[in-house]
Image: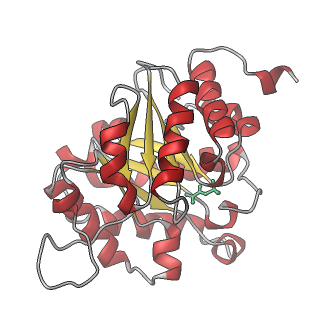
Amino acid sequence: MTLTKKILIVANWKMNLNVSQASLLVHKLDKKIPIHKDLEVVLAPPMLQLQPLSLQIDHRKFKLASQDAYYKDEGAYTGQVSFTMLSHLVQYGIVGHSERRNIFNESLTETAQKVAAAYRNGITPILCVGETKIERLSGETNQVLHDQVVSALSNITSEEVRSLVIAYEPVWAIGNGEPAKPKDVANAIKTIKLNVLELYGKKAAEEVRILYGGSVTPDTVSGYIRLPEVDGLLVGGASLNYLSFSDIVANAYRVGRGLTTKQDKA
Ligand code: PEP
């Protein structure tokens, strides 16, 4: 974490919580999480919850993200929601999450179209990239990251890249309680930065924000936030519990300010 950037913590609730459960979780988070000027907390609830939560949240404390959206702006696409429709509701949009790529067969091209659509509609993409276990074991991690990064950025300008957020989420570490080692995260992020540097130059590579995601808990926050390469975290399972998510936010804030966490002392 470099001191010039705000720490970014993103909660991906996936397909969990109905409208009243989501509202209750925000109510509890609001009591636990203070306004931090050096830290941004972004909530990515299911699509249906975005509108009511946009009226409920304290916008000084929380921002909203979509978990996905379609790349066309409007038209005969039954069942889809576009970034155009989300443009006044969310500031960020998660794009290319491994569950979209692997369960819904989202292609590299489609992910690139979604990144472009997000920018076209004034939404900052949080582009998820990461290798599967098989790809990792076959030594293909760097190639996979290269292909995912280069293809996703093919339709955007260097100016746009500077505000981009990339989440390094090794697929093998998601949702299973087996987080990646900080050393491996640092190496993967160096590869990602190198890809951005080769495409868009030094300034873009310095300014793009890179998060780690995969089984993050309050105990593991400091190992990642201490890394100069990491600008924040994308949290799935642990973001559904107000105590663990508020602890993650508090720990990230403390470590970002050079302090220790409860877990460091234990
Ligand atoms: C995710 O789905 O983006 C994620 C990081 O999930 P988890 O924290 O549950 O591994």
Q: Considering only vertical position in the picture, is 111 above or below 12?
A: below
Nearest the viewer among 39 and 241 is 241
Q: Position of residue 150 (x, y in %)?
A: 35, 64
Q: Is residue 160 left or right of residue 187?
A: left
For the point 27% across and 62% down, which residue is it?
115
**Which residue in the rendered view is the most extreme toward the front?**
20
Question: Would residue 232 be seen by someone viewing this image from the given angle?
Answer: yes
Q: Hey, which quadrant is residue 63 in on the image?
A: top left
For the point 71% across and 36% down, which residue is it?
218
Q: Position of residue 112 (x, y in %)?
A: 29, 69
Q: Is residue 7 left or right of residue 202?
A: right
Image quarter for ligand 1 equals bottom right
Q: Considering only vertical position in the picture, is 94 above or below 181?
A: below
Q: Position of residue 240 (x, y in %)?
A: 61, 49
Q: Hey, which quadrant is residue 91 in on the image?
A: top left
Q: Is residue 132 left or right of residue 79?
A: right
Question: Would residue 12 be seen by someone viewing this image from the given angle?
Answer: no
Q: How is the image coloured?
A: secondary structure
**Which residue in the rendered view is the most extreme toward the right?**
266
Nearest the viewer among 199 and 172 is 172
For the point 33% across and 31% down, which residue is it?
59
For the point 51% across and 47% down, which residue is it?
11
Quarter of the C terminus within the rendering: top right
